[in-house]
Amino acid sequence: MRILELSTEEQVQRWFIDPLAAYLRQKGHQVIQKSGFARTISLRDLWSVMKVWWWLTRWHIDLLHVQTAKAGAIGRLAAWMAGTVRVVYTMHDVPFHDGLPRWKKRLYRWIERRLAPLCHAVTVDSPAVKNRALEVLPDRKITVIPVGVDTTRFQPRVKPLMLGMVARLVPGKGTETFLGLIHTLQAMQQPCFGLLVGDGPLDPLLQRDAQQWNIGIWFAGAQGDVRPWLAAMDIFLFPSEHEGLPVAVLEAMSMGLPVMVSDLPAFDGLVRHGETGLRVQPGDWIQAISDLMAAPARRWMLGHAARVHARTYYEQAASHRAYEHVLTGVV
């Protein structure tokens, strides 16, 4: 079948007609595409009607498919003059919409009503457009065909998560373990990067290992204000070997980050496993991180609970008042 696709706007051509024309060509149809008519009504439209009539007759078109109101009017008139076998009009919205002046709205409604007999079928994008189109078209001519999107081209993109740690780069803090975790996760094709904030004697050794193992990690060095770096993280890891009460974990919790820490007595009361964070045994880190990476809702809930917990029990102002009482001897 020889098909002429006719529209007014290049956007309509690109979004609707190009994919449809490609599909029809795959089905064996010969498709010709034309566009570019001015949207406003003028005497030049008479020349446009004659030009379309010439296309229809010269190319022996079997089907004229017109999209948008202006192309619809020009195309239907030309097809009536050429005796085209079949005419289909796609109305993405009614041209007599409420945003027009009253006189123009009446004019467009009158045009659509007069041209209604000059096509065999009308397609609309939604039931709402159909309800408006029924003002000028019989129900039997209207078919609702929702706009299609090639969902295979718009698959969800997995965003690499930033796994971070803030600590002095000294033995016992678990920075070597942190580096090894990032290495293992990336080798498993887990979508993640590492962000290590801090400095210390282990810095050159860690950077050497990261380079040799080709680990995707950012060494940020010591930072006076860690808030921007914490804000870049999705999960805060603290796989230390021994600990007091680390301020770095408190700061991460205050930022609303889900925290994962070693299962040490130091974290009793601060990190309640499964509530305000996760306490992880030495051999369970990879599985625990993988599970949390795959659960965005759980990450949010843990982070929210961590912030509430930090603000409730570890607010600095309350700590300062308590120290004041002890230092001054005030009971």
Image (cartoon, rainbow, N blue to C red):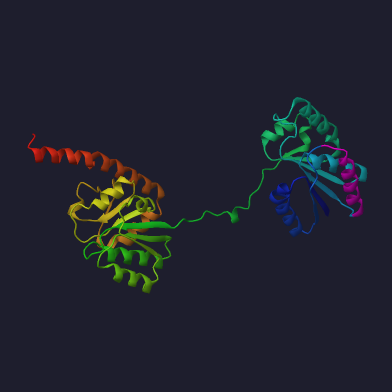
Residue at image coords 87%, 44%: 48
Residue at image coords 18%, 40%: 320
| Position in image of residue 311 (x %, y %) | 27, 40
Q: Quadrant of the N terminus?
A: bottom right
Relative to 289, is 130 above or below? above
Residues 62 and 269: in front is: 269
Residue 215 located left or right of residue 83: left
Residue 79 in view in this figure? no
Q: How many callouts does the rendering have?
A: 0
Span highlighted in magenta in the image: 41-58
Q: Residue 36: within the magenta?
A: no
Relative to 52, is 223 above or below? below
Residue at image coords 30%, 70%: 204
| Position in image of residue 280 (x %, y %) | 26, 57
Residue 209 located left or right of residue 101: left
Q: Residue 56: within the magenta?
A: yes
Residues 217 and 305: in front is: 217
Residue extending furthest toward the top: 102
Residue 242 located left or right of residue 34: left
Residues 51 and 93: in front is: 51
Residue 245 in view in this figure? yes
* Type of secondary structure dominating the magenta stretch: helix
| Position in image of residue 109 (x %, y %) | 79, 30
| Position in image of residue 199 (x %, y %) | 28, 62
Residue at image coords 72%, 52%: 20
Q: Quadrant of the C terminus?
A: top left
